[in-house]
Amino acid sequence: MAVSATRPERITPSLTVQSPLGSEKRGPGLVIVSPAGGSGSGSAGQQQLLEADAQQTYARQGYIVAHLKLSPGYNELRIRDELREATEALDFHDNCSDKSRYGIIVHDTLAYPSLVEAINCNGEIKSAVFIGEPSKPCSKSFLSISPEEYSTDATSAQDKALKYLRGQ
């Protein structure tokens, strides 16, 4: 799949994929999950800015970013399918260097109680960073960053997430 280098490509109504923005045109895959419409902790506008900045930040660091925006009402099966679509988009991306070995960053963990179960069942997700505590036990290697830390100093929190994901 060829994706524009500068703008995210919409794959489905809830999924966009951003190619790396740095000098490297190949890189590892990363899934970001956030609430659709900015519904989450904090103001909607602030949340959307943080998420867009995160997608750009990780793309500048050489990641191919699959950004999945979920509605809080999604059931467990729908969430599992959406997550599978995100990892498949990375699998089929021409410039993804580590196929089937992805990290995931989850914004607003309370919005999706069944997301952790979907992560646990997805063999392509190897490690996770949660903004907030996961709602259920996570069987993958994971790091939790408090929502307060993320909203106060997003750059530092994003650096912490990158360092963790690179070490896995």
Image: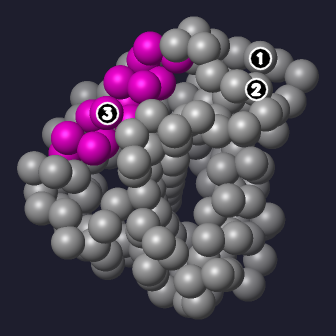
Q: Is residue 55 left or right of residue 70?
A: right
The amino acid type, in three-letter code, at marker 1 is: Lys
User: Does label 1 or label 2 sit earlier along the sequence?
Assistant: 2
Return the residue at label 3: 85
**Can residue 120 be spotted in the picture?**
no
Residue 84 shown in magenta: yes
Q: Horizontal placement of 46 versus 120: left or right? A: right
Coordinates of residue 32 in the picture (x, y in percent): 50, 50
Which quadrant of the figure has residue 148?
bottom right
Q: Quadrant of residue 159?
A: bottom right
Q: Any mark on residue 129, and which?
A: none
Residue kind at label 2, given as amino acid type: Ala
CA distance separating discs 3 and 1: 22 Å
Q: What are the residue bounds of the magenta stretch?
A: 80-93
Give the mark, 3 or 2, whose residue is nearer the N terminus.
Answer: 2
Q: Which mark is residue 5?
A: 2
Circles 1 and 2, Cβ within 8 Å, touching? The answer is yes
Magenta segment, principal secondary structure? Answer: helix
